């Protein structure tokens, strides 16, 4: 039997059969097809270098690899934490959306990114301009939306709460970030 593995024709035929089995099983796991191909490629190159592989290793190894496929699939699906599904909300009368950048080799945490304010009426990206009296406004000419909190920009009638006035773009962002942070901590975002 060992002679069969050393024969280049036979080992290629057997490698082909094994490849077909691995790839057909792999089709059930779309996300892992890439990994399966890499594994199959490894098996293929191993045969081509004509290193004799003990038959028992193939008989035990291949079913073990196939059994690992659903386990790996589950691990990959569980990797995304639940809060990464929270990517939009209606805050301060504005439709906000954002992204969670996954951890990479330079950073262990998810990073909040691309906070985008959109008009609730026409879905255009809103302008937030400290030098415009409205502070937050929709640039779409055919849209009649007005920021409901625009009047709070000048809170002269509440001198005691002057610091509460949303009079600057940084205050808008601070409030939005704190509201997102609050909803993440209370778990409120899951019901909203
Ligand atoms: Zn609009």
Image: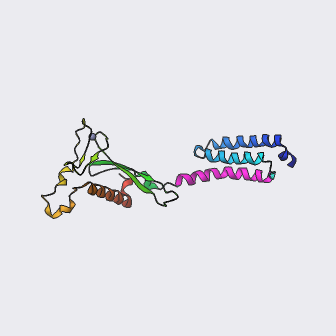
Residue 1 seen: no
Position of 15 with respect to 31 (left or right) is: right
Q: Residue furthest front?
A: 131
Where is residue 130? Give x, y as percent: 24, 52
Position of 156 with respect to 56 (left or right) is: left
Colouring:
rainbow
Q: Residue at x 45, y 53 (%)?
A: 101
- Rendered view: 12 above or below 177: above
Q: Residue furthest bottom?
A: 160
Where is residue 25? Give x, y as percent: 66, 43
Residues shaded magenta: 55-78
Instruction: Give ligand 1's quarter of the image.
Output: top left
- Rendered view: 121 above or below 107: above
Taking depth in this image into account, of 109 and 18 the one nearest to the observer is: 109
Taking depth in this image into account, of 21 and 96 the one nearest to the observer is: 96
Q: Residue at x 65, y 46 (%)?
A: 36
Magenta stretch, main secondary structure, is: helix
Residue 121's quadrant in the figure? top left
- Rendered view: 23 above or below 111: above
Position of 48 with respect to 152 (left or right) is: right
Q: Residue at x 32, y 57 (%)?
A: 179
Q: Is residue 67 magenta?
A: yes
Where is residue 23? Give x, y as percent: 67, 42
Where is residue 85? Give x, y as percent: 43, 51
Labels in figure, total = 0
Position of 119 with respect to 34 (left or right) is: left
Q: Residue furthest left?
A: 157
Residue 22 seen: yes
Q: Residue at x 23, y 47 (%)?
A: 147
Q: Is residue 185 magenta?
A: no
Taking depth in this image into account, of 104 and 98 the one nearest to the observer is: 104
């Amino acid at each position: 039997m060992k002679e069969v593995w050393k024969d280049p024709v036979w080992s290629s035929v057997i490698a082909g059969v094994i490849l077909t089995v691995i790839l057909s099983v792999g089709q059930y796991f779309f996300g892992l097809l890439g990994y399966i191909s890499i594994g199959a490629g490894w098996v293929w190159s191993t045969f081509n270098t004509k290193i004799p592989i003990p038959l028992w290793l193939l008989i035990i190894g291949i079913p073990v690899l196939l059994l690992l496929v659903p386990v790996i699939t589950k691990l990959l699906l569980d990797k995304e934490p639940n809060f990464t599904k929270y990517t939009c909300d209606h805050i301060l009368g504005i439709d906000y959306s954002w992204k969670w950048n996954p951890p990479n080799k330079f950073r262990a945490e998810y990073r909040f990114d691309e906070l985008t304010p959109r008009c609730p009426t026409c879905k255009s990206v809103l302008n937030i301009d400290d030098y415009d009296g409205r502070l937050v406004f929709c640039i779409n000419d055919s849209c009649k939306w007005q920021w409901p909190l625009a009047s709070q920009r000048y809170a002269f009638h509440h001198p005691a709460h002057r610091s509460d006035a949303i009079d600057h773009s940084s205050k808008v962002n601070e409030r939005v970030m704190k509201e997102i942070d609050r909803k993440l901590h209370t778990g409120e975002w899951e019901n909203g």
